[in-house]
Image (cartoon, rainbow, N blue to C red):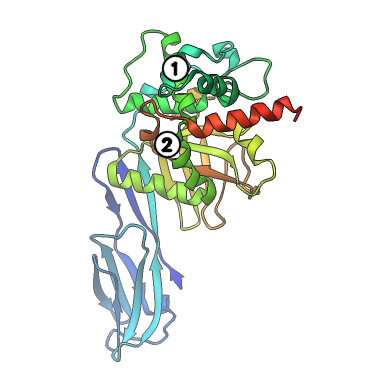
Amino acid sequence: MALVRPVLITRNGLDAPRVRVDWIDLEATTFGAQNATDDDLRVVGPAGWQIEPVGPGHWRARANRVRVGQNAEFRLVDTRDAVRGSVRVPLTFDLRSSFDIRQHAFSLPNSPGALGDVEPDRQIFDQTYAPMPDFAARLLFEGLYSAIVFIRSVAPTGGLCTGMARWAIARGQGQEPAPPTQAAALERIAVYHGRQLLDRSLLAAAGWFLRASPRAAFFAVRDDLLRAGTTDRALDIGVPKPWRRDVATALVEQGHTVVPYHLVQESDERGWIAVYDPNRPDLIDAGEPRIIEFDLRRNRYSYGALVSMEQDNVGMIAIRQREYMSRGTAIFATVASALFARHRERGG
């Protein structure tokens, strides 16, 4: 099926989406028909498109309304309604969120050089989860919680990127007040970071983890921006696919969280998303912003040195903010912490 010039759909924050397209020329030769005139052929298109004859074997079409997620297909038919050929008009997108990430993001990078060492804190832990028995709280605090909620200059892993991403989204939603001090901000960031271990957060992430589809995450963000002009999703990238042998270790030690704010889909096969990266807050809306590039056909993506387009063993998670907005149970993480503790006692 032949392709013609694409239709561009734009949205800038809360402004209404706009369809940017001029008249598209369609000729019989575009459909592969030779020596045809408009007396014996006509062009049939999808609903929402205006089609006008221009001359023998020549028409023009313009979109008044398009159906998102479905490319426009035009068919050349004869007097018996037999299809003589078809062409497709692809949809492209340029969508920017209303979320002012520069205003709400934590201004310092997610690094010990900027923040110093951050250690697990039991008082912050108690603000993160619903009340639980002392033995369970001790298991979780000394287990998975302490394995993820820290920043240390001597540790190769660690960081609070998920907390920074979720805190920034909460601020943008008006759910989190401006912090009086940097220390107060870091405490709230640690709370949000620990909430990735909530049962509801893990359950919401499970479907994305098993699906392991960067393409699905791209379209989820695109659909949010088209529908609402914003998105409350953060993107967990570098997530190991479930079939990897090192999946348990990689889930704790690898991965990164970023916040999308600008999406461009250039074709059916290619697109990119500009993101707030807690490691580089200085690059928000910069001349060279942090960008996730997507190969939508192969269902792969690349991001800096973390993920390359040649990797097929990493997925992406794109759950909503609501899973992080209040305390809750952490039964799964507590049980896992008990298993890890037993494994360590056995010298594993």
Residue at 64% across, 38% down: 248
For marks 2 and 1, give the CA distance.
Answer: 17 Å
Q: Are there few (<14), some (14-19), or many (20+) residues within 10 Å of tag 1?
A: some
The percent coordinates of residue 3 (x first, y second) are: 44, 67
According to the picture, the residue beneath numbered tag 2 turns out to be 200
Q: Is residue 106 visible?
A: no
Relative depth, front residue between 163 and 36: 163
The percent coordinates of residue 60 (x first, y second) are: 29, 70
340 vs 72, left or right, is right
- Position of 308 relative to 26 (above/below): above
Residue at 24% across, 60% down: 65
Label 2 or label 1, whichever comes before in sequence order? 1
| Image label count | 2
Name the secondary structure under disc 2: helix
Residue at 59% across, 12% down: 117
Q: Is residue 32 visible?
A: yes
- Position of 177 relative to 220 (above/below): above
Relative depth, front residue between 280 and 346: 346
Amino acid type shown at disc 1: Asp
The percent coordinates of residue 323 (x first, y second) are: 39, 34
Name the secondary structure under disc 1: helix
Q: Return the mark for residue 24.
A: none
Q: Return the mark for residue 126.
A: 1
Amino acid type shown at disc 2: Arg
310 vs 264, left or right, is right
Marks 2 and 1 in Cβ contact (< 8 Å): no
Quarter of the image that includes the C terminus? top right
36 vs 290, left or right, is left
Which residue extends farthest right? 347
The percent coordinates of residue 283 (x first, y second) are: 49, 27
